Image (tube, grey):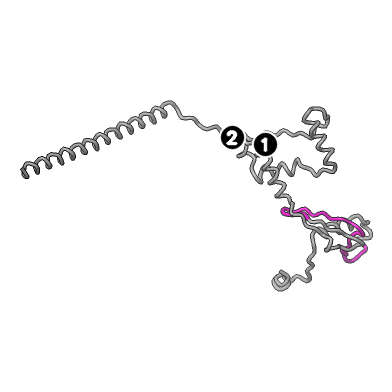
C-alpha cells in the first residue's frame, strides 16, 4: 500500500493509525481554543491524559484504554459483537414474534432502518426494562417507549374467474375420459392376444391327437 502511494501517486508522506485513536485525538484538539490551533504551524497528534475509547464497527467492538497520554495495546480488548450481529438478533426476534410478516421483515433492509432510527444504548438497563413493562401495562406516561409500525400490505392474489374454472374442469374431464378410453383399448388388446393363444393351443392339440 505504501509503495503504491509513494511510487504511483507521489504522496510525500504516509501515516498509518487506528481510527478510534484519531477520533479521540481530534475531539481532544477540538476542545482547545481556536487561537492556539491557528498559531501552531503543524497539527500534532495528542491523546488525552486518561480515557477509554469504545469503537463500534460492523463485525466487532474494540475497547482501547489511554493512560497517562499513551495507548495501552496490552490492555485493549476486542468483543465479537457488532452492528450486524445486533441487526441479525433483532431480525430473528421480530420474525419469531410475528411469523405472518416474515417476508415483510427483511434483513438488512427494514431491520437496519428500525435499529438506526429507533434503537438506543441504555444507560440504565434495569430501569428501562421496568419502564417498558409499565408502558405495556399502560401505567407509564412516557409515550416514546412503545412504537407502532405499519408494514406494507402484501399484494392480493388474483383469483381465477368462473369461466376459467369451468374451462379447467372441462379439460380435466376430457383428460379423464381419454385415459379411460386408453385403458379400454389396452384391455381389449390383451383379451385379443389371450384368445389368439387359446386358438393356437387348441390347434396344436388337434395336430397331436
Tag in front: 1 or 2: 1
Q: Quadrant of residue 132?
A: top right
Task: Name the spot of residue 152 as percent of width and height, x first.
Answer: 63, 35
Task: Name the spot of residue 50 as percent of width and height, x first.
Answer: 91, 58
Instruction: Tell whether position 108 is magenta.
Output: no
- Image quadrant occupied by the C terminus: top left
Q: Nearer the viewer, residue 43 or 173?
A: 173
> Relative to 37, is 121 above or below?
above
Instruction: Tell whether position 59 is magenta.
Output: yes
Range covered by the magenta-colored residues: 39-61
Q: Quadrant of residue 63?
A: bottom right
Q: Residue furthest top?
A: 162
Give the residue number, with chain letter if any, for mark 2. Answer: 154
Q: Residues within 10 Å of mark 1 (few under 14, many from 20)?
A: few
SS under mark 1? helix
Q: CA distance from mark 1 to mark 2?
A: 19 Å
Residue 187's tag is: none
Give the residue number, with chain letter if any, for mark 1. Answer: 97
Task: Name the spot of residue 7 as percent of width and height, x first.
Answer: 71, 73
Number of callouts: 2
Q: Main secondary structure of the magenta part?
A: loop
Q: Residue at x 91, y 55 (%)?
A: 31
Q: Nearer the viewer, residue 13 or 118?
A: 118
Q: Residue at x 78, y 69 (%)?
A: 14
Q: Residues within 10 Å of mark 2 (few under 14, many from 20)?
A: few
Sequence-first tag of 1 and 2: 1
Amino acid at each position: 500500500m505504501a509503495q503504491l502511494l509513494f511510487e504511483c501517486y507521489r504522496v510525500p508522506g504516509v501515516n498509518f493509525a487506528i481510527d478510534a485513536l484519531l477520533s479521540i485525538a481530534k475531539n481532544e484538539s477540538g476542545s482547545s481554543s481556536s487561537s492556539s490551533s491557528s498559531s501552531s504551524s503543524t497539527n500534532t497528534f495528542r491523546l488525552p491524559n486518561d480515557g477509554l475509547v469504545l469503537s463500534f464497527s460492523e463485525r466487532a467492538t474494540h475497547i482501547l484504554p489511554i493512560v497517562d497520554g499513551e495507548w495501552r495495546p496490552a490492555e485493549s480488548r476486542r468483543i465479537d459483537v457488532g452492528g450486524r450481529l445486533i441487526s441479525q438478533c433483532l431480525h430473528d426476534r421480530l420474525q419469531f414474534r410475528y411469523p405472518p410478516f416474515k417476508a415483510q421483515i427483511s434483513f438488512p433492509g427494514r431491520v437496519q432502518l428500525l435499529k438506526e432510527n429507533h434503537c438506543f444504548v441504555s444507560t440504565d438497563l434495569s430501569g428501562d426494562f421496568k419502564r417498558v413493562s409499565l408502558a405495556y401495562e399502560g401505567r407509564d406516561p412516557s409515550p416514546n417507549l412503545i412504537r407502532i409500525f405499519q408494514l406494507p400490505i402484501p399484494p392480493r392474489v388474483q383469483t381465477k374467474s368462473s369461466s376459467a374454472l369451468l374451462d379447467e374442469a372441462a379439460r380435466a374431464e376430457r383428460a379423464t375420459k381419454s385415459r379411460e378410453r386408453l385403458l379400454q383399448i389396452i384391455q381389449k388388446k390383451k383379451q385379443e392376444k389371450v384368445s389368439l393363444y387359446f386358438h393356437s393351443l387348441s390347434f396344436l392339440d388337434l395336430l397331436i391327437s
